[in-house]
Amino acid sequence: MADEKDRRPKVEVEQGERDERQAAPDATPGSAPEGREESRARGIGAVTAWVSRTFPGNENAFWGGLVGLLAALVLIAIGPWYTIVIAVLVVAGVAVGQLADGDPKIVNALRRLFSRGNQ
């Protein structure tokens, strides 16, 4: 059994330059680590760039298909009536937000739709 222990490879640990991921950041007063918003913006930018490279000229079709897929999954998961209620409430929330922004596109479209005659 002593021979078997001698035949096993021995692990050697070399100390050299540290990996950049392990290196401590420069701690200067007033410098904060990168925020979540910046990393999220980079992530969204990377996804948008990938979509542009993969589907040139059809980016909106890709996003529309993705939204449709998500809507179908929600419809299957919670049922049609809950999905309709959620969609109506989301549109109402967007309409209120547009009113607050001073650009009520949805409200104006509803006024045109339900107005008496063509004015």
Image (spheres, grey):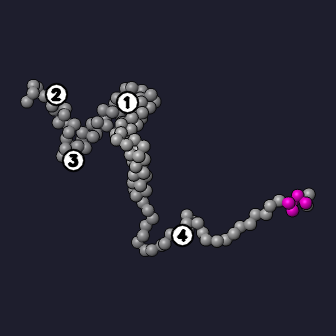
Three-letter code for the amino acid on which mark 3 is drawn: Asp
Nearer-the-camera pick, 48 or 72: 48
> Residue 101 got which mark?
3
Which residue lies at the image location 83% right of the left edge and 59% below the top edge? 8
Question: What secondary structure is the magenta-colored segment mainly?
Answer: helix
Magenta extent:
3-7
* Disc 4 target residue: 24
Specify whether 15 is left or right of 8: left
> Mark 4 or mark 3: which comes first in sequence?
4
What whole-number distance in Å separates the C-alpha atoms at marks 4 and 3?
A: 45 Å
Which residue does the numbered mark 2 point to in the structure image? 114
Disc assigned to residue 118: none
Left or right of 95? Residue 114 is left
**Residue linked to disc 1:** 83
Element type where label 2 sits in the image: helix
Q: Is residue 44 visible?
A: no
Residue type at mark 2? Phe
Label 3 crowd (10 A; few <14 / some 14-19 / many >=20): few
C-alpha span from label 1 to label 3: 27 Å
Check disc 4: other Cα within 10 Å, few if <14, some if 14-19, many if 20+: few
On the image, the x and y values in percent for residue 78 come to 43, 29
